[in-house]
Image (tube, grey):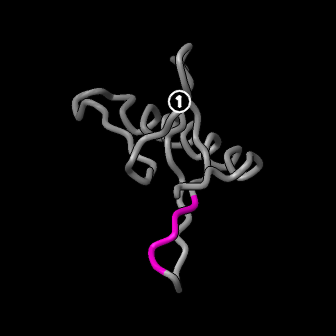
Amino acid sequence: MSWTYRVRKKAINAAEIEYGIIEYYTTADSDGWTECWMAPISIVAPDDPLSDAKALDELRWQLMGMLKALDEPILEDD
């Protein structure tokens, strides 16, 4: 299985449409996505002297993936 980020579009009601970043995955059998909207997050050990640098690297990697999702087709959630 591999995954990336994609933009998801979902109708909330007749007057509102919601857009958000989700994790999109592909497998040998099918494609799919997570049900939850994504927000950048990083969890590191507090006693690691490089924790700030590691957290920033992880957040940067996630944000770059999310920015790339803006160039991909939008996934329609019916």
* SS assignment for the magenta stretch, majority: strand
Image-based side of 52 in relation to 72, left or right: left
Closest to the observer: 55 or 37?
37
Q: Residue furthest top?
A: 28
Image-based side of 5 in relation to 53, left or right: right
- The amino acid beneath tag 1 is Tyr
- Magenta segment range? 9-13
Q: Residue furthest left?
A: 47
Closest to the observer: 55 or 72?
72
Relative image position of residue 18 (x, y in whole percent): 52, 69
Kindly identify the residue that appears in the image at 46 percent across and 79 percent down: 13
Relative image position of residue 57 (x, y in whole percent): 52, 35
Relative image position of residue 65 (x, y in whole percent): 62, 40
Q: Residues within 10 Å of mark 1 (few under 14, many from 20)?
A: some
Task: Tell me which corner region of the image, top left, top right, bottom left or bottom right, holds residue 52.
Answer: top left
Relative image position of residue 23 (x, y in whole percent): 50, 40
Closest to the observer: 12 or 44?
12
Kindly identify the residue that appears in the image at 42 percent across and 38 percent down: 55
Total marks in image: 1
Kindly identify the residue that appears in the image at 53 percent across and 17 percent down: 29
Residue 77 lies, with reference to residue 5, above or below; the image says: below
Residue wearing tag 1:
25
Image-based side of 52 in relation to 24, left or right: left
Q: Would residue 5 be counted in the magenta stretch?
A: no
Kindly identify the residue that appears in the image at 53 percent across and 30 percent down: 25
